[in-house]
Image (cartoon, rainbow, N blue to C red):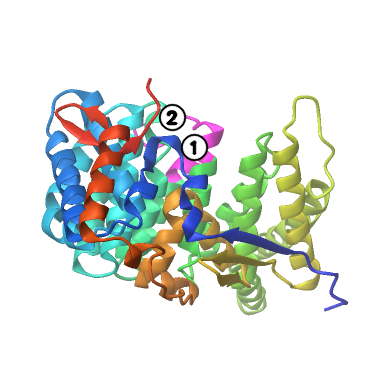
Amino acid sequence: MGRRKIQRKNVAILDSDDDNSSETSSSIVCSDQMSVFGTEEVEFNKESLVDEAIDALFEKRGSTREKALEVINAAFNFNLQCQFVENKFATLLHQCLNCIKKGSSKEISLASRTIGLLALTVGPGVHAQEILEESITSLSQAFNSGSESSKIISIPNCLAVITFVGANGPEEIEKSMQIMWQIIHPKLGSNVIAIKPSAPIITTAVSSWSFLLTTMDGWRPSPKLWQESVTYLSSLLDNDDRSMRIAAGEVLSLIFEMGSLEKFVAETKGYIDSSALEGNKTKDRFSHIQGLKGKFLNQARDLSVEAGGKGSSKKDLNNQRNMFRDVLEFLEYGYPPETTMKIGGVALQTLKWSQLIQLNFLKRFLGGGFAKYMQESEFLQDVFGFTPKRRNLVGYDHISNTEKVDLNKQRMLSEGRNIGHFAICVGYEDS
């Protein structure tokens, strides 16, 4: 295999005591007000706020629904709303789907994320399967509605998450992947004009597609489908958009890690030797795949040392160089990148492309709530083989129940915002 180069290890620290530092402004909950004041009275206040937010999803005014969704997103980020979800599951799901059908770009984005958070909160089982079954048609229709990119860019992530949690077998996962592939590589159909999607849409769809591909070890699509997929993904490496190139590089590395392409090449070679009737066609396919392997290696080598051009982001350029250096080391020596991050003082490691892709995707989707979910979601703990540290809340035992409630009320009154007919404890940007 050759001598292994000195491997770069990426180390990140994500302590749950400082979740807010990485949250987006549209879903910043006042967790410092609530994190240590966990009495029953305070829990009741939080649930009341979320109850009122769900009621506000029935309002006609779009801005009211948006702000209600911000409350719900913030509540999910602060704490896994398991009991609340059990009681309000169907109402929340169907109102979010209505928001996706008729809402603004912001409302669709918030509703899509809420549905994904709902699936992650309930975990695998009947509810997660229902989320997927009830949502997939609406999400697919949204893709095909011809809406502008800003209205559908959040939907691939939502579909990926609810499929990841709720799919009952590879057939359902493949169905969602096919929907995403139509965004990545739209084709002309009967009475349908293929509209070229924007670079951000393609990048998001490729990322979501690769996230689901991580769950499909042993997947055996037709040789024609593999050839088409790898050929098109390889072409994305020549795109001007760096984020798209990185997403394409990751999924191609995953395909090689899964061994799918090598199995396809081996099977194709065996078919050449045993079939005279289809011999020429299969030889051409075999040669094409071998050529794609060589092309990918050359592209990775070039992108790992690409010089920055005028107006180019240094951060994006460095991200690309680092990622394709990892790709190059993997292709040449067989070693995937290793990463380590700490959550609440406990290390979470990835040793394979599939794990790294899952980790990066869920970090992006959950944002500032990632550490909280990793510490409380048994499903995600099982996915990554992560065991969180159990510890008491700092300061909780040194404050009386009355003091906790009074302090919480004071902070909520001083920092809460009125939204529609209810008050919430959430930060958001005014439009």
Residue occupying the point 62% across, 73% down: 259
Q: Quadrant of residue 428?
A: top left
Pointer 1: what residue? 201
Q: Which residues are magenta?
A: 182-202
Identify which amino acid the numbered label 1 is placed on: Ile
Q: Residue furthest top?
A: 431
Residue 12 versus residue 334 in the image, above or below: above
Asked if residue 185 lies in the magenta stretch, the reply is yes
In screen coordinates, is 19 left or right of 425? right
Residue 104: % across, % down: 30, 26
Can the viewer see residue 141 in this picture?
no
Residue occupying the point 52% across, 46% down: 21
Q: Are marks 1 and 2 in contact (CB under 8 Å)?
A: yes
Residue 248: % across, % down: 62, 50
Identify which amino acid the numbered label 2 is placed on: Ser
Secondary structure type for disc 2: helix
Residue 366 versus residue 390 in the image, above or below: above
Residue 429: % across, % down: 40, 27
Q: Main secondary structure of the magenta part?
A: loop
Q: Quadrant of the C terminus?
A: top left
Residue occupying the point 48% across, 75% down: 386
Asked if residue 5 lies in the magenta stretch, the reply is no
Query: Nearer the N terminus, badge 1 or badge 2?
Result: 2
Residue occupying the point 50% across, 49% down: 364
Can the viewer see residue 32 in this picture?
yes
- Residue 149's label in the rendered image is 2
Q: Residues within 10 Å of mark 1 (few under 14, many from 20)?
A: many
Q: For this rendering, which residue is in front, 73 or 40?
A: 40
Number of marks drawn: 2
Secondary structure type for disc 1: helix
